[in-house]
């Protein structure tokens, strides 16, 4: 029997490697044939190195030209027709919309729509945003709701409740899996270092990540006489409507209120040398940056919004504050700055939360169970492939 084929569709290659490569490697090691359709970027050579098929696609997250968007849908249809996947795993809004349509046209046996948070579109906005949001909701109801061959994967209970309440999916289609999974060996627990406390925020540089409020909170804290450093780690994302300009980030850096480090690959080392992790976002799925910080054993200050609140048990491993409130954010950070032993105690609780729910092994196992529900009787093919791979390795 041939191994089942899983096709990931995702807008950016860097996002696949940061958020879905652990799952893809687990599937590969279990005998699955894995292909990835994404934009060709800096990581294109790594696909072959890891044994994945690479299908370059032209998908512009910010694209609005109807002809270009139709061409992208046609390209996705061609990829599916050529690859003949058993399951397509769609990550992000455009891949879900366009890939979902292509999967239906090609009669793919199983479709997983991975909703990594409701995103910018579902935050409050003007008439145009409301119109687009209504169109997306209609698409979900028409293309996905009630279909047994479609499963919607969300990262927190708030998003599940929202999709149900808006009739975008039925309850039996929705599965909650907390995050993308972290490799706890690559992000090992450590006691915080000595020296000046460091508050680290690792994310894309977007206004709706609460970066503006964080900068103002840093000003408040420094005016109050605290000695500490604030690190912003991440690049601007010009394709996102909420992107912060490089000019603005550099201005904050030059002011001395924060240190903007840009995109970095040594995240584990940065977290090891930090004392507090902070993400004052307006809404999330379940942020990998906080999962990684918790794995290292750092207390967390985050906003009491979907996605972030899953990472914090108030007073146990950190503090939750209202969104868009710099004063409350500053006060919560100051509590931790003044008490090293509380930071260490909370950091241990952070690690426990990760070990109980968010390791790559737990997340990958739950995702494979989801695949099993979609494939049904055809799951025996996967079982056969896994046994064959194991026997050959032995």
Image (cartoon, helix red, strand yellow):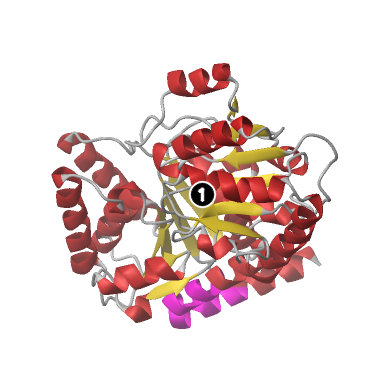
The residue that appears at 37% across and 39% down in the rendered structure is 57
Residue named by callout 1: 328
Q: Say whether residue 357 is left or right of residue 210.
A: right
Query: Is 244 left or right of 1, judged from the image as shown?
Result: left
* Image vertical order of residue 323 relative to residue 262, above or below: below
Residue at image position (30%, 60%) is 103
Residue 268 lies within the magenta run:
no
The reply to whether residue 183 is visible in this rendering is: no
Q: Quadrant of residue 266?
A: top right
Q: Is residue 216 above or below residue 4?
A: above
- Vertical order, 220 against 282 (above or below): above
Q: Quadrant of residue 153?
A: bottom left
Q: Which residues are magenta?
A: 368-384
Q: Position of residue 23 (x, y in %)?
A: 59, 58
Q: Position of residue 105 (x, y in %)?
A: 23, 60
Q: Is residue 380 magenta?
A: yes
Q: Magenta region's main secondary structure?
A: helix
Q: Quadrant of residue 244?
A: top left
Quadrant containing the N terminus is bottom right
Q: Secondary structure at mark 1?
A: helix
Tell which of 117 and 77 is nearer to you.
Answer: 117
User: Within 10 angstroms of label 1, few (less than 14), some, or many (20 or more) residues?
Assistant: some
Q: Nearer the viewer, residue 113 or 308?
A: 308
Q: Nearer the viewer, residue 16 or 78?
A: 16
Residue 269 seen anywhere in this rendered image of the structure: yes
């Amino acid at each position: 029997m041939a191994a089942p084929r899983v096709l990931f569709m995702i807008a950016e290659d860097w996002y696949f490697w940061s958020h879905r490569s652990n799952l893809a490697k687990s599937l590969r090691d279990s005998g699955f044939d894995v292909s990835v359709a994404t934009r060709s970027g800096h990581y294109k050579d790594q696909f072959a190195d890891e044994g994945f098929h690479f299908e370059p696609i032209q998908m512009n997250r910010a694209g609005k030209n109807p002809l270009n968007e139709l061409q992208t849908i046609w390209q996705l249809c061609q990829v599916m027709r050529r690859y003949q996947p058993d399951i397509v795993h769609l990550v992000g809004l455009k891949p879900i919309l366009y890939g979902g349509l292509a999967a239906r046209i090609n009669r793919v046996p199983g479709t997983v729509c991975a909703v990594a948070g409701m995103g910018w579109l579902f935050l409050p906005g003007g008439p145009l945003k409301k119109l687009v949001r209504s169109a997306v909701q209609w698409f979900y109801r028409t293309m996905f709701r009630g279909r047994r061959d479609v499963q919607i994967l969300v990262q927190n209970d708030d998003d599940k409740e929202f999709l149900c309440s808006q009739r975008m999916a039925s309850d039996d289609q929705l599965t909650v899996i907390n995050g993308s999974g972290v490799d706890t060996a690559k992000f090992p627990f450590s006691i915080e270092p000595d020296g000046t406390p460091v508050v680290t925020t690792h994310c894309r540089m977007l206004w709706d990540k609460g970066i503006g409020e964080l900068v103002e909170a840093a000003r408040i804290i420094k005016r109050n006489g605290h000695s500490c450093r604030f690190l912003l780690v991440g690049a601007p994302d010009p394709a996102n409507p909420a992107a912060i300009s490089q000019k603005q980030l550099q201005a904050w850096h030059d002011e001395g209120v924060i240190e903007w480090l840009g995109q970095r690959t040594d995240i584990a080392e940065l977290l090891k040398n930090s004392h507090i992790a902070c993400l004052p976002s307006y809404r999330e799925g379940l942020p990998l940056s906080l999962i990684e910080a918790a794995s290292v054993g750092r207390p967390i200050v985050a906003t009491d919004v979907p996605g972030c609140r899953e990472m914090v048990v108030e007073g146990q491993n950190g503090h939750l504050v209202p969104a868009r409130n710099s004063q409350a954010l500053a006060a919560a950070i100051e509590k931790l700055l003044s008490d090293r032993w509380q930071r260490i105690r909370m950091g241990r609780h952070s690690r426990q939360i990760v070990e109980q729910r968010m390791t790559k092994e737990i997340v990958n196992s739950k995702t494979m169970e989801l695949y099993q529900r979609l494939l049904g009787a055809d799951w025996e093919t996967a079982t056969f492939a896994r046994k064959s791979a194991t026997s050959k390795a032995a």
